[in-house]
Amino acid sequence: MNIQQYFEYCLSKKGVKEHFPFDEDTLVFKVGGKMFALASLQEWEKGNPSVNLKCDQERAEELRAEYDDIQPGYHMSKVHWNTVKVNREVSDKFLKELIDHSYDLIFKSLTKKIQGEVLSSE
């Protein structure tokens, strides 16, 4: 997966907006004002692409045990976030599933009011 495919996939999800809240390098995708995916653009350009994704705690531990390219979230809560190295052992299809999981976790954590606003947007 290249950066454009990642960008387009994240933005294709309902109510998603892109931000650079930390610096000009860290691309963050949010739904309902909450982060579900982030990545360093410079690392993609250097050929070391990775993304940070929210994950259910038990599943996060299982994924880390199963895949060398899934590690505890870099600069994030190690309990709820994973850093996934892209274009290695994790397939594009599986990466999309992990993005979906992260999005779904964040969406479900939103208030019913904000969920309704997200669903009625666009």
Image: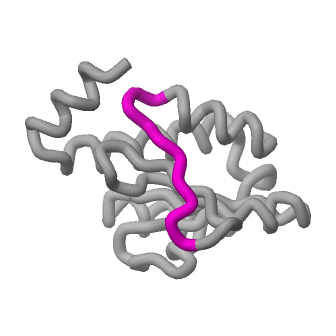
Q: Nearer the viewer, residue 23 or 13?
A: 23
Q: Does the magenta segment cover residue 77?
A: no
Residue 67 seen: no
Residue 59 seen: yes
Q: Residue furthest left?
A: 112
> Where residue 52 sits: x, y (%)?
55, 62
* Quarter occupied by the C terminus: top left
Q: Residue at x 81, y 59 (%)?
A: 44
Q: Does the magenta segment cover residue 21?
A: yes
> Where residue 41 sits: x, y (%)?
75, 60
- Is 4 rendered above or below residue 66? above
Classified by dominant secondary structure, the portion drawn in magenta counts as: loop
> Where residue 96 sits: x, y (%)?
57, 37
Q: How many numbered tags mark residues here?
A: 0
Q: Is residue 91 left or right of residue 120?
A: right
Rendering colour mode: one colour
Q: Nearer the viewer, residue 42 or 58?
A: 42
Q: Nearer the viewer, residue 79 or 36?
A: 36
* Quarter occupied by the N terminus: top right
The magenta-colored residue range is 13-22
Q: Quadrant of residue 60?
A: bottom left
Q: Is residue 57 left or right of residue 40?
A: left
- Is 38 rendered above or below residue 4? below
Q: Quadrant of residue 93?
A: top right
Q: Residue furthest right?
A: 46
Q: Residue at x 21, y 43 (%)?
A: 108
Q: Residue at x 36, y 75 (%)?
A: 79
> Where residue 68 sits: x, y (%)?
67, 68
